[in-house]
Image: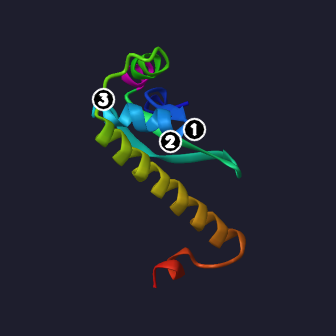
Amino acid sequence: MNPQEDNLVKIADVNLAAAILSTGKVKLLGIESDDPNRLFFLLSPKAICLELEQSYYNNTLITSAREMTNRIRELKDLLFGEKRKREGEKYGGNYGDYDR
């Protein structure tokens, strides 16, 4: 693992990732997959993500409901786009064709 990866957290749960992102204290760096049926959101910095995750599970995380809703939509859009991209690759299509 390189130093940049040491500062990442991988989260598969859309609601958890949205809650953490809605605080404005962390950044979404991208999406990654280690198997065809599961995607992970890559968040950074790790220390803050882990603190916020603990608060989320302890039901003590304070964030804006509107901001969390916006982050859920954003993450679902990313997941859907990634799914379409993978399906295009799987069937030999061009992902760009969806946008024309």
Circle 1 sits on which residue? 12
Q: What residue is pinned by disc 2?
A: 41
Image position of 44 (left or right of 94): left
Q: Give the structural element (helix, strand or loop) at label 3.
A: loop
Q: In the image, which residues are magenta?
A: 46-50
State which tag comes first along the sequence, 3 or 2: 2
In depth, the one of 6 and 74 nearer the eye is: 74
**At numbered mark 1, what does the secondary structure look like: helix, strand or loop?**
loop
Amino acid type of the residue that numbered disc 2 sits on in the rendered structure: Phe
Residues marked 1 and 2 touching at CB (< 8 Å) = yes
Residue 22, image x, y percentages: 33, 36
- Residue flagged by tag 3: what amino acid is it? Thr
Of helix, strand and loop, which one carries label 2? strand
Instruction: Using the numbered discs, state the Cα–Cα distance from disc 3 to disc 2 in whole angstroms.
Output: 19 Å
**In the depicted structure, whether residue 30 falls above or below residue 91:** above
Q: Which residue is mark 3?
A: 63
Query: Picture coordinates of residue 19 (x, y %)?
Result: 40, 33
The local crowd at label 2, few if under 14, some if 14 to 19, many if 20 or more residues have their Cα within 10 Å, is many
Report the predominant secondary structure element of the magenta stretch.
Answer: helix
Q: Is residue 28 above or below residue 54?
A: below
10 and 60: which one is in front?
60
Mark 3 packing: few (<14 Cα in 10 Å), some, or many (20+)? some
Locate residue 3, reporting x and y percent.
45, 29
Give the residue displayed 40% in from the left and 17% down from the top.
51
Q: Quadrant of residue 25?
A: top left
